[in-house]
Amino acid sequence: MAVPCPPIRERGKFVANKIVHFEIMGSDGEALAGFYREVFGWDPEPVEGTDGYHLVGEEDTGVGGAVGQGTEEMQSYVTMYLGVDDIDEHLAKIEGTGGATVTPKQVIPGVVAFALFRDPAGNVMGLAENETPPAE
C-alpha cells in the first residue's frame, strides 16, 4: 500500500516544475468543448484564429487548460504541461534518461514556448517555459 504524500506546503518545499496547463483533444473540437460545458459546467472559450481550440480557465478546473480539436498526427489525446525554465535543457535530460522528443520547442511570440515529449512508458507530456517569450 502506497503512503499518501503530504501536501507540499507541509513539507516546506517549493515545486519548481508544477503542472501549468492541460489539453483534452479530439477529432471534433466543437463537440468536445460542448461535452465538457454540458457535463461539468466548464466555460470553454474559442481562441480566434484556431481550428476548434477552446481555453478553459482555472476557475473551472483548478489549472488552466484547453479542450478542442486534435492535430492530424494526434487526433485524440490528453496531456499535461509542466512549467520549466529551459525547454531545451529538459528535452536533453528527457532524451538522456529514456524519453524522446515528440515536438521540439515551438514559440508563439507573446504567448508561450512549448514542446512535447514521450516518457519511457509512452505517455505524451508537454513542457511550457515559465517565462512568456517576447512578442514580435
Image (spheres, rainbow, N blue to C red):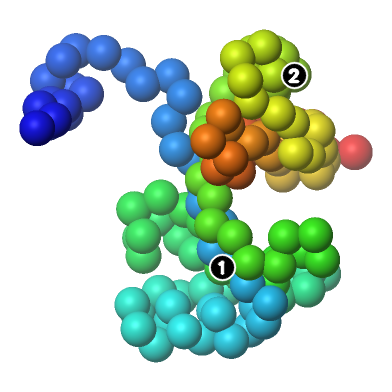
Relative side of 136 to 56, left or right: right
Q: Taking 69 as reference, is 6 left or right?
A: left
> Any mark on residue 114, and which?
none
64 or 119: nearer the viewer: 119
Note whether residue 86 is visible. Answer: no
Q: On the picture, is 6 further left or further right than 97?
A: left
Image quarter of the N terminus: top left
Residue 89 point in image, percent of width and height: 69, 13
Q: Residue at x 50, y 64 (%)?
A: 56
Question: Where residue 119 sits: x, y (%)?
Answer: 57, 32
> Image quadrant for the C terminus?
top right
Residue carrying label 2: 88
- The answer to whether marks 1 and 2 mark residues whose Cβ atoms lie closer than 8 Å is no
Q: Which residue is mark 1?
A: 67
With respect to residue 117, does 48 lie above or below?
below
> Residue 25 occupies which quadrant of the picture?
bottom right
Residue 9: quadrant of the picture: top left
Residue 108 in percent (x, y) is at: 80, 43
Q: CA distance from mark 1 to mark 2?
A: 26 Å
Three-letter code for the amino acid on which mark 2 is drawn? Asp
Q: Secondary structure at mark 1?
A: strand
